[in-house]
Amino acid sequence: NAGVMQNPRHLVRRRGQEARLRCSPMKGHSHVYWYRQLPEEGLKFMVYLQKENIIDESGMPKERFSAEFPKEGPSILRIQQVVRGDSAAYFCASSPGWNSGDEQYFGPGTRLTVT
Amino acid sequence: DAKTTQPNSMESNEEEPVHLPCNHSTISGTDYIHWYRQLPSQGPEYVIHGLTSNVNNRMASLAIAEDRKSSTLILHRATLRDAAVYYCILRDGGDKIIFGKGTRLHILP
């Protein structure tokens, strides 16, 4: 059973460009979470999605950031008009359900560098 | 999610047991205690979780105080690969994880 997959692993964008980060959850998992880790800082929750629904986007910046998890295909985190402050590691996690005991399985992350 | 308190850093010698403490005095009856760790340049990794009873798995043991206001993650025989940041987290429901600063564990060869 393959783990959570993220691509690309490294992404370099110039200021003003768009960044698209992809996450394929573990097989059978319908819950996806995105987290961001700024350099030398802790992990911060961004958004929680189920298939075709955004459940909680309380950690998502109000502008330029969007996320989706379509019926078919990976979850996408999209950052428009990137700025240097968006440089960070973005981690995706998936879980099989919504129980307190369900662990989240994390992917290896996408490291975004904005030049 | 309720708050947890962990030491900023700890050191241990290789091949010795490590006890990582966590205080969670405001824990509610429905909060599960989860531990995750993050190795350098990797995503977080689930370690173990429990509710009331002590738990063991292939990675570690979790000892939960009788009043549930504290817990201890036990690595029985630390290796250099166990050097990581360890996060103690309370979860009531399966939504987002609120990560604190965690404990940075250094393993001395």
Image (cartoon, rainbow, N blue to C red):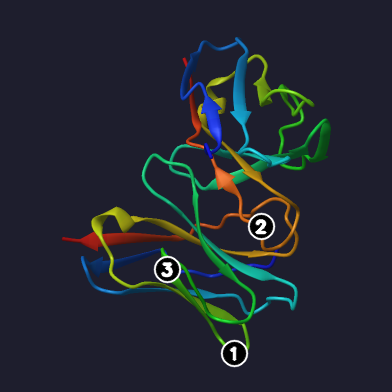
Q: Position of residue B51 (x, y in %)?
A: 64, 75
Tag 1: amino acid: Glu
Q: Is residue B56 left or right of residue A104?
A: left
Closer to the camera in the image, A36 or A21: A21
Q: Is residue A96 above or below residue B82?
A: above
Of tags 1 and 2, the one toward the viewer is: 2
What's the distance in space between the residues labelled 1 and 3, CA to CA? 19 Å
Q: Quadrant of residue A31?
A: top right
Q: Residue at x 71, y 62 (%)?
A: A100
- Residue at mark 3: chain: B
Circle 2 chain:
A
- Relative to B70, does residue A103 appear above or below in the rendering? above
Name the element at disc 1.
Answer: loop
Q: Secondary structure at mark 2?
A: loop
Q: Which residue is mark 3?
A: B60
Q: Which residue is mark 2?
A: A102
- Say what secondary structure mark 3 lies in: loop
**Amino acid type, residue under disc 2 in the picture:** Asp
